[in-house]
Image (cartoon, grey):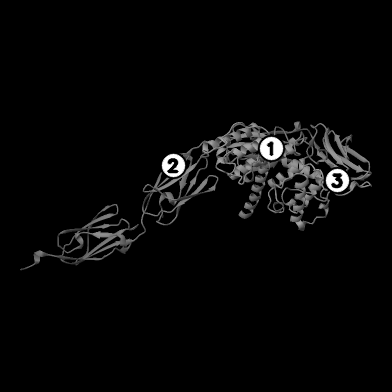
Amino acid sequence: MAGLDAEWKKIQKKTFTRWTNEHLRKQGQSIDDLAVDLSDGIKLIILLEVLSQKSLGRYNKKPKMRAQKLENAQTALNFIQQEKIKLVGIGTTNIVDSDIKLIMGLIWTLILHYQISIGFGGKEKSKITPKQALMQFLVSKFEGSPVSVSNLTTDWNSGIAVATLVNAVAPGLCPECVDMKPQNALQNATHAMQLAEDWLGIPQLLTPEDIVNRHIDELSVMTYISLFANAELKEGAPIKGRAPTTPDASKVKAFGTGLQKEGLNTDMDMVEFTVDVTEAGPGELMVKLDRPGKDGHVDMNPQGEGVIICTYKPDVAGQYIITIQWSGERVPGSPFFVDVAAGLNVFKAYGPGLVDQGLVEAQQTEFWVDLAGAGQGSVSFTIKGPKGPIRDKWLRVEQTDKGFHVMYTPQFPGKYEVELLFAGRHIAESPYELHIAGIPVDAKKCHAEGDGITGKGVEIGKPCSFLVYTKGAGRAELGILVEHQLENVALDCQQKDVDVFECSYVPRKPGEYEILIQYGDNDIPGSPFKIEVDSPTDPSKCRVAGFGLFPLSVSTPASFTVITKGAGKGEVEVAIHGPDGLLGYSCKTHPYTYDYTYEATSPGLYTVDVKFAGEHVASSPYSVAVTDTSKVRI
């Protein structure tokens, strides 16, 4: 899956780069790398000046220092805000530091505003999304052809849709589209896209290889296809075919807002649709409108060259039936069924989840949508936050007798937007702009657990781990530092859930380790944690010394010392055996040091057993000869 993900990203980056160069070329500029070449802000400013046809004023034309580049980037972002273009998440440092993900998001925003939205603007279409407007344009162009598209990705892979669009925009430029075969996808796309570039002036922002790639992304296709909206046929184009001499209703094209199934309501004034009989031969046009309660009236206004603009007023809610005939025969798509919804003033949307007050991250909120009396039409809504739409377990929708009950939980603080649409149009006060406050940061509400902070079972050379929980502590930076004798220890920390982090490190040396855990620059409870890590158990590392291991006299106090530093974990065991059996002793302990004292009561050979962790230390057992000089006779 990672390879497929990278593939569509690569196509999108190439498309956005070509789109940028198409505009920069007007000022004799170009870029090779979308991220790197915009990082000093110069070409981004030039791009904005070309797109807006406005001057951004003075800026650093030869920035060498980072501060100058940041200043240029700020000039560009300030201008974008002045143009009332919404930006999400990008700042000057993202541009200067070549953050490709956010820079591509910025370029897409510019494409939407300066190309797609403007190319499909208008009073009625301003209430629908750019994607919906583009799809409506395609439906109108493909009307009457055997080709239809339901998406902006895989439906274009055969190259036939591109060829059909070329012929629809310029009838006769690519009539061979009707005979194209899907198995010749690359050939189809290459031929159609070359015609579009040569005779419609549409640059190949996508290559034919891109368009036939089944992993092509939607934004790249939208960027390319939207150019057809304002394309004009050049003089001398190789138009094929002759005008028919008999009426042919199948060649009539009918399209426009007034024929769409959804999107109309009684608040609208006149709506229109277009009937194009250019290729239908001689004949007579008949348009009939049936609507609830009474027949409707349609005004037909010929525009010349076989194009007729038809208008009517949707002043009654319900289903409209529009029948279009050419010389007594129904045209493709006729009759058209249009659902006209009641005016937006009948809708009600209410609840704390739509009020920009008191909303806090990680806390569920809700709202209701009342559709009583709204007529026919589908409902859709989106709740978008700083990291994308809210979905899955953070969103729940229940149907009520009047509409819908929506419950959602914003997971991050920041700006949110709630869009409510009925029949493709915003209802009530949609879109609602909300600000979600963050939970106050409180490091005391965090806690950590695990062997890595308690020291239980921790061994040299083996990974040890611990968990940090931040639920209810607000949103802040988690900082963790593991030190050993003032040296940093490598730490691996992974976020396992929204508020759970798993951390691990490997102790390489014995001694004390300090684990500092801070949240929002404040220690969490128990921090800093301190643990002692011992060396691996090795009795051979113990040292034993003292006069009590050498020949001595009876009734003379004898002592020796056992030092265990560096020998790891273990218990010291000492046993002294003499002629009279097991001999007692005393022991004083210090860190890693054990001082033993005993006194032999009888002459003879003694053995001193010294064990660590159940095993003899080096040279153990020791043999000690004890003599009694008082019994020597000379």
Q: Position of residue 434 (x, y in %)?
A: 63, 34
Query: What SS does tag 3 mark?
Result: loop
- The reply to whether residue 241 is visible in this rendering is yes
Query: What SS does tag 1 mark?
Result: helix
Q: CA distance from mark 2 to mark 1?
A: 50 Å
Can you tell which quarter of the image residue 599 is in?
bottom left
Q: Nearer the viewer, mark 2 or mark 1?
A: 1
Tags 3 and 1 in contact by the CB under 8 Å rule?
no
Front residue of 544 and 263 = 263
Query: Tag 3: residue type?
Result: Gly
Q: CA distance from mark 3 to mark 2?
A: 71 Å
Q: Earlier in the sequence, mark 2 or mark 1?
A: 1
Can you tell which quarter of the image residue 606 is in?
bottom left
Q: Nearer the viewer, mark 3 or mark 1?
A: 1
For mark 2, does the 10 Å Cα neighbourhood hold few (<14), some (14 to 19), or many (20 or more) residues?
some
Q: Position of residue 236 (x, y in %)?
A: 82, 45
Q: Nearer the viewer, mark 3 or mark 2?
A: 3
